[in-house]
Image (spheres, rainbow, N blue to C red):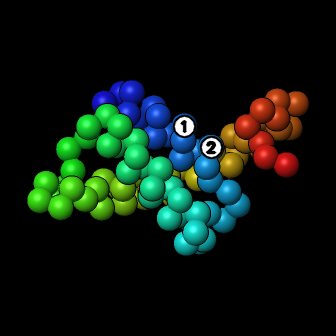
Amino acid sequence: MKQIAHELTENVRNNTSIDWQYKQSVQAKLRVLVKRILRKYKYPPDDPSTGEYTVSVNRVLDQATQLADYWTKGAISDFSKGNNLNVAV
């Protein structure tokens, strides 16, 4: 579980853009990304009969939305300190 959480966090964080919470295209890309990671680790689907991960994907994106401000502040702080490794220009 720790490996899944780490990979989800890194991939979602690295694939977000400005105002991603409001852009349907970016959210769709993130949904696909999350589903691929869950399948990669054979995470059990929310609905075994359909193999869907709707609840799990929504939970991950909801948590990412809550963390978005923190990630942005961290990136701005790193940039102001001269460490711009995680900042897209």
The image's mark for residue 45 is none
Disc 2 is placed on an element classified as helix
In-image side of 18 versus 6 (left or right): right
In-image side of 2 versus 87 (left or right): left
The image's mark for residue 14 is 2
- In the image, 18 versus 26, the foreground residue is 26
Between the residue at mark 1 and the residue at mark 2, the CA separation in whole angstroms equals 6 Å
The local crowd at label 1, few if under 14, some if 14 to 19, many if 20 or more residues have their Cα within 10 Å, is few
**Residue drawn at the location 13% of the way across and 54% of the way down:** 48
In-image side of 15 versus 56 (left or right): right
The local crowd at label 2, few if under 14, some if 14 to 19, many if 20 or more residues have their Cα within 10 Å, is few
Amino acid on which the number 1 mark rests in the picture: Glu
The picture quadrant where one finds residue 77 is: top right
Q: As displayed, is residue 13 above or below residue 51?
A: above
Amino acid on which the number 2 mark rests in the picture: Asn
Q: As displayed, is residue 74 above or below residue 35?
A: above
**Residue drawn at the location 78% of the way across and 32% of the way down:** 85
Whether residue 71 is visible here, answered yes or no, is yes
Q: Which residue is mark 1?
A: 10
Looking at the picture, how far across and down is residue 53, in whole percent? 28, 56
Looking at the picture, how far across and down is residue 54, in whole percent? 30, 61
Q: Quadrant of the N terminus?
A: top left
Count of picture labels? 2
- In the image, 36 versus 54, the foreground residue is 36
Disc 1 is placed on an element classified as helix
Looking at the picture, how far across and down is residue 65, in whole percent? 51, 57
Looking at the picture, how far across and down is residue 76, in whole percent? 77, 44
**Residue drawn at the location 31% of the way across and 34% of the way down:** 41
The picture quadrant where one finds residue 59 is: bottom left
Q: Are marks 1 and 2 in contact (CB under 8 Å)?
A: yes
